[in-house]
Image (cartoon, coloured by chain):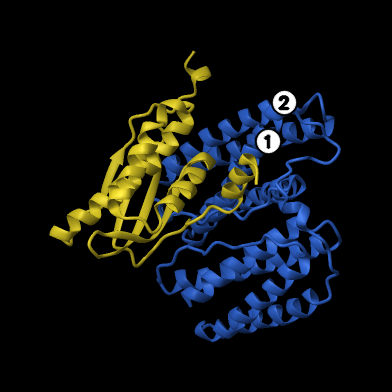
Amino acid sequence: MTANAHLMEHMMNPKNYGDMPENDAIGIGKNPQNGEKVAIYLKVKEGDEPVIDDISFQAIGCTTTVVSGSIITSEARDITFSRAEELISVTLGMLDKLPPEDAACSEMVALALKAALDTYAERQKDKDFPVISYIIKTDCTPKEEEE
Amino acid sequence: MKILFKEVHELWLATQFTGFMSKTQSRPELYEYANIFFKHLTWLENDFVKNEISYDYNVNHVPIKVTHISHMINNIIARIIAVEEKLKSCKDGDITFRMQSDLTYIKSALEKLPEEEVAPAFDTKRVYPNVELSEEARDALTLFLFEESYKEYELIMVYNYSKANSNDAFLNRIFQILIDESFFHLRSFGQMMADMGILGVPRSLMEEIYKFDDLEQFLKDGIQEEIGAKEECKKLAAAVSDSSEHFASFFTFINNQENYHIALMEEALAYINSK
């Protein structure tokens, strides 16, 4: 499968898309510039360290956001929370290599995952802890529009 | 009843998108059946509204990637049988009778549709028949089709929800026109996606997209989105004008249709503000 065909597959059939009514935690990533948002739902398996047993996402956003969500949630399935934190960190570290509009979409998904992990951690102390939302820092205005 | 509603919604999408992948006389027939399933959805929805039962448009992903149309036809028939089994959960006998009658006929008609190879609708080649596209134009068209096919599905459901939950005849006339317009656009874009080998069913909608409190703001945002879509159409028309006159005139036509949608939304806004 070529890189293009791989991306097309995520566009045509996004992985892990949809809500999860029986979730253990939800996290939200938001872009206040254009009102776009991503929600990530987690089902967590407890053990020595919590593991993401099931994950899904929903988005009000563009196709790039959906592709990012499809890729990142696929990577996050069945990994421990500390591996998920590494995944978030690697994703956020790559943002400056992407065009601004793509970077904003990936950041929104990574922050939604971070928010879901943090919501889960808080709910271990207080089961009624509200859903955490994080706001992206990347300006998603394409360069040609700024000029 | 909520499961029945969800399954009818999925049945509609499966049938509509199977219509897109067909290149034979099966296409218009599948479109007609999809129309009937959408009508069933609105009947069930009206029953929810009448009985003040909350509902949503959540659906599971509808997989459609097949090599032959018979695979999807069998899938649609299996979906119809599942719907028939749940029909008794609908307490309205008239709806149940009408739906059952339609489903029985459609099942038998579907079994007679000819076999057809449909793998090219999913081959991701992104080659439009008889049109030379530059890499840039091809990428722009690909993104446009994904964005806009989702958008048209979203608009159908948003206006349908607004219409189902409003008794205002003036607004409902406008909502219905916008639903019909979005159906036409969804069909145009869906057929193009199949031609380019990138056909996929749009993702499901988050509830807050259609369950909004501020119709005025929704219409204002909608007008801005239509203006944005017009710009995209203009850019695409320019990008493909060298390689395809037909393509360029199609996007100019879609661009001009957006003017009508904007006029309708402005009419709705003026009406709301005059009340």
- Residue identified by numbered label 2: B239
Q: Earlier in the sequence, mark 2 or mark 1?
A: 1
Q: Colour of chain A?
A: yellow
Quarter of the image for residue A25 reads: bottom left
Q: Which mark is residue A123?
A: none
Quarter of the image for residue B129 reads: top right
**Residue at the front extreme?**
A48
Q: Position of residue A126 (x, y in %)?
A: 14, 59
Q: Are marks 2 and 1 in contact (CB under 8 Å)?
A: yes
Residue at left offset 74%, top offset 60%: B19
Residue at left offset 36%, top offset 35%: A92
- Residue identified by numbered label 1: B141
Position of residue B136 relative to residue A15, above or below, is above
Q: Chain of mark 2?
A: B
> Does residue A18 show up?
yes
Position of residue B177 relative to residue A99, above or below, is below
Q: Nearer the viewer, residue A28 or B186?
A: A28
Give amino acid for label 1.
Leu
**Which chain does blue denote in the image?**
B
User: What secondary structure is found at the residue carrying circle 2?
Assistant: helix
Q: Position of residue B12 (x, y in %)?
A: 63, 65
Q: Distance of mark 2 from mark 1, alpha carbons?
A: 9 Å
Give amino acid for label 2.
Ala
User: What secondary structure is found at the residue carrying circle 1?
Assistant: helix
Q: Nearer the viewer, residue A23 or B93?
A: A23
Left or right of residue B182: residue A58: left
Where does the C terminus of chain B fall, quadrant-wise? top left
Residue at left offset 61%, top offset 83%: B84
Quarter of the image for residue A127 reads: bottom left
Q: Position of residue B75 (x, y in %)?
A: 68, 72
